[in-house]
Image (cartoon, rainbow, N blue to C red):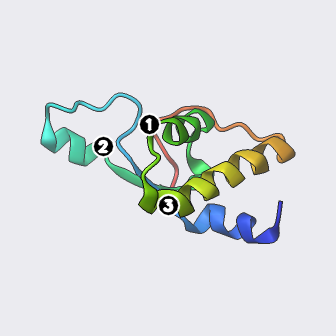
Amino acid sequence: MNKLHEVQRHLYKWGTFGKNPDMSNNAALMKAFQVVPISQLSTYHIYAILRMDQRRHLLHYLRLFKNELKYRALNGLYIPETDRYKI
């Protein structure tokens, strides 16, 4: 893994509503929305994004997410699921 990814994982951010957002309540949904560095996303969340989000304009992010998973594997990192990110 290169040094560039070590910087990118903290700089690039992803928007998330958390694990179980109330999609019927816009006010609660907006309150739950957080933008967090990819280094803080749960490992499961990254796998879910890669499974679900194959939009062409996100190719750069998809590459970053794959690199992040490789980085975590090489460094023995696992980030558990949470709704409380420490930004």
Q: Quarter of the image holding residue 43?
A: top right
Label 1–label 2 contact, CB within 8 A? yes
Q: Nearer the viewer, mark 3 or mark 2?
A: 3
The residue indicated by pointer 2 is: 32
Q: Quarter of the image holding residue 10?
A: bottom right
Instruction: Describe the element under mark 3 as helix, strand or loop.
Output: strand
- Any mark on residue 11, and which? none
Residue 17 appears left or right of 30: right
Task: Report the amino acid beneath label 1.
Answer: Asp
Residue 39 is situated, as x and y percent measured from the top left of the image, at 62, 53
Label 3–label 2 contact, CB within 8 A? no
Q: What distance separates the C-alpha of mark 1 from that of mark 3?
A: 16 Å
Residue 73 is situated, as x and y percent measured from the top left of the image, at 80, 41
Residue 20 appears left or right of 47: left
Q: Earlier in the sequence, mark 1 or mark 2?
A: 2
The residue indicated by pointer 3 is: 13
Q: Residue at x 72, y 65 (%)?
A: 5
Crowd tier of the residue under label 3, counting other residues whose Cα lies within 10 Å: few below 14, some 14–19, many 20 or above: some
Crowd tier of the residue under label 2, counting other residues whose Cα lies within 10 Å: few below 14, some 14–19, many 20 or above: some
The residue indicated by pointer 1 is: 83
Task: Report the amino acid beneath label 3.
Answer: Lys
Q: What distance separates the C-alpha of mark 1 from that of mark 2?
A: 8 Å
Task: Report the amino acid beneath label 2.
Answer: Ala
Residue 12 is situated, as x and y percent measured from the top left of the image, at 54, 65
